[in-house]
Amino acid sequence: MNKVALNFSDGRTKFIGVNAGETVLDAALRQGITIPVDCREGVCATCKGRCSSGDYQLEYVDEDALSQSDLEQGSVLTCQMRVASDCAIEFGFESTLCTSSGPEELEAVITKIDLVSESAAVVYIDARARGDQLDFLPGQYAHVNVPGTEEWRSYSFACAPNETNQLQFLIRLLPQGVMSDYLRDRAKPGERMKLKAPLGAFYLHQIKRPLIFVAGGTGLAAFLGMLDQLVENPERCDQPITLFYGVTQVADLCEIERIQQFAEKLPNFSYYSIVMKEAAGWQGPVGVVTDLFEDSHFNDGEVDLYLCGPPPMVDAVKGWLDEREMANSAIHYEKFSAS
């Protein structure tokens, strides 16, 4: 089964699974998303979109529905589209024209809380009571209820989806914060936690060029999930993967052993880390994450970049690229604020 992202003009994204031989339209309808359609025969163009990523084939397409120029620019008719890889499709209409159940609310059980640094914890939860596998793409996030309160917070999955729904979140511990206080003071294995998932349009697209991952703080979580997925499916990537990881101080560095394991399992993977504040015993680089960049990392701009971290970091990386006129780079990013 391939994953297809349906991106609508109002900024919303829906994800569907498409079976071998199934059209995108049929897959969407099967999963409760009613893409507008009239003829279902490749003539009316009501279900038209543009494929921005992925491999596919079109069955019959009437020349009055899509011109040769349209086809060359990636225009598709979802009623005639059969995918051969994960894909992303852009639509010129809003998601409100479609109906969908949206993110699912489920209940899970906390199994472990691991303080992986002075400022971060990995929360392990067991959602096997759901039954079948929770379907999400690494890079997406869940909206998590703070037990005992009406407050909800959003965290990226720090793992790949799995059959037993054993999930992880890498959570920053703030000096004061409703989730931070809960994890430090009250959380215990066995307690129940509600979440809504999946959410977000940040995910790993089809890989055809070298990958650059840039993580700021607990933005690392999204990349842990992506790298987990690539370890499990090495055939998805034969390109170099470089992770740049920046934090404020040495004590904030976390999951380094796990990152090193990725380097052992993925032959094309390398990583660099940097801290903003000097510290005794730290022999690595000091500065901001863009200080790690060298032009040689970016393959003359022919790379796909994924950025996840605080807004200043994301903006700084985009500015660094703009200064070097790397217009051919594809940039996918997720900004977040601590809460």
Image (spheres, rainbow, N blue to C red):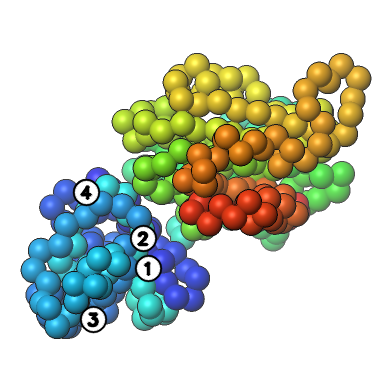
Q: Which residue is mark 3?
A: 46
Q: Percent x, y for residue 218?
A: 68, 41
The image quadrant where one finds the N terminus is: top left
104 to the left or right of 75: right
Characterize the local packing of mark 3: few (<14), some (14-19) or many (20 or more) Cα atoms within 10 angstroms.
some
Q: Which residue is mark 2?
A: 52
137 to the left or right of 34: right
Question: For the residue marked with disc 2, what is the amino acid?
Answer: Ser
Q: Which residue is mark 4?
A: 84
Q: Percent x, y for residue 27?
A: 23, 60
Q: Measure the alpha-carbon separation of dots 4 and 3.
A: 23 Å
Characterize the local packing of mark 2: few (<14), some (14-19) or many (20 or more) Cα atoms within 10 angstroms.
some
Q: Earlier in the sequence, mark 4 or mark 2?
A: 2
Labels 1 and 2 touching (C-beta < 8 A): yes
Question: For the residue marked with disc 4, what is the amino acid?
Answer: Ala
Labels 4 and 2 touching (C-beta < 8 A): no
Mark 1 or 2: in front is: 2
Q: Earlier in the sequence, mark 2 or mark 3?
A: 3
- The residue at 27%/69% (across/down) is 75
Q: Earlier in the sequence, mark 4 or mark 1?
A: 4
Q: Earlier in the sequence, mark 1 or mark 2?
A: 2
Q: Quadrant of residue 191?
A: top right
Residue at disc 1, secondary structure? strand
- The residue at 37%/68% (across/down) is 90
Question: For the residue marked with disc 3, what is the amino acid?
Answer: Thr
Q: Which mark is residue 90?
A: 1
Q: Earlier in the sequence, mark 1 or mark 3?
A: 3
Q: In this picture, is 235 found above or below 280? A: below
- The residue at 87%/44% (across/down) is 175
Residue at disc 2, secondary structure? strand
36 to the left or right of 258: left
